[in-house]
Image (cartoon, rainbow, N blue to C red):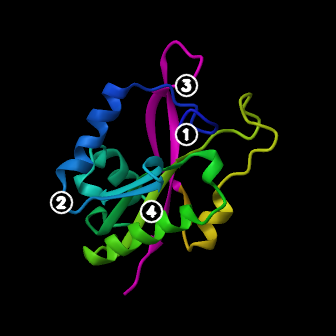
Amino acid sequence: VFREFPYLYDGSLAYEREYMRSFAASPRSTLVIARDGEAVVGAATATPLLEHGEADVAAQALRTVGFDPAQVYYFGESVLLQAYRGRRIGHAFFDHREAAAREHGFAVASFCAVDRPRDHTSRPSDYVPHDVFWSKRGYRRHPGAVATFTWRDLGDAEESAKPMVFWTKELGA
């Protein structure tokens, strides 16, 4: 799924194993799995921001727009195979992670999304960003909260920096 636009991620299993260690290490992490029978068709992760492997970069971005990183439950991945989209599974991913955040006493849920230019050469003509979905769920985009992460895009020889814009939702009681 991360190989699709807008991520175009050309990663490795070794990197992903290492990345997932921070989620596995925290007893307050959440993993939501979507299955079709025994087959895994999607997954979503979340963890306290300060327990995430890339906490320093994310925390700094959120501080710039007034959030206390200690109060943030960070939503990592949310991936779902194309054939299973449009069935409210994405909503279930958010519902479960927001419930976990509240259960663990967090005031804010947050995630970040890559910010690709509208004229990116790999953008499919029928691409629809998830911004409307996220906004309808009560998330707010913070253009001033940007972190830079690096990865190799499909077809590239080397990694390059990508801006990741943060979205937040105040959870309330």
Q: Residue at x 46, y 54 (%)?
A: 35
List x then y, in percent, for residue 107.
34, 76
Q: Which residue is mark 4?
A: 65
List x then y, in percent, for residue 128.
73, 51
Instruction: Report the amino acid beneath label 2.
Output: Pro
Kindly indicate the quadrant of the structure image that contains residue 111. bottom left
Contact? badges 2 and 4 (CB < 8 Å): no
Contact? badges 3 and 4 (CB < 8 Å): no
Whether residue 66 is visible, yes or no, is: no
Q: Is 138 situated above or below 82?
A: below
Of badges 2 and 3, nearer the viewer stands 2
Instruction: Report the amino acid beneath label 4.
Output: Val
Q: Secondary structure at mark 3?
A: loop
Query: Residue most toward the front?
Result: 37
> Residue 134 in magenta?
no
Of badges 3 and 4, nearer the viewer stands 3
Q: Which residue is mark 2?
A: 27
Contact? badges 2 and 3 (CB < 8 Å): no
Q: How much space separates mark 2 and mark 4, taking CA atoms?
A: 28 Å
Q: How much space separates mark 4 and mark 1, taking CA atoms?
A: 30 Å
> Residue 172 in magenta?
yes
Q: Secondary structure at mark 1?
A: loop
Kindly indicate the quadrant of the structure image that contains residue 156. top right
Residue interval drawn in magenta = 144-173
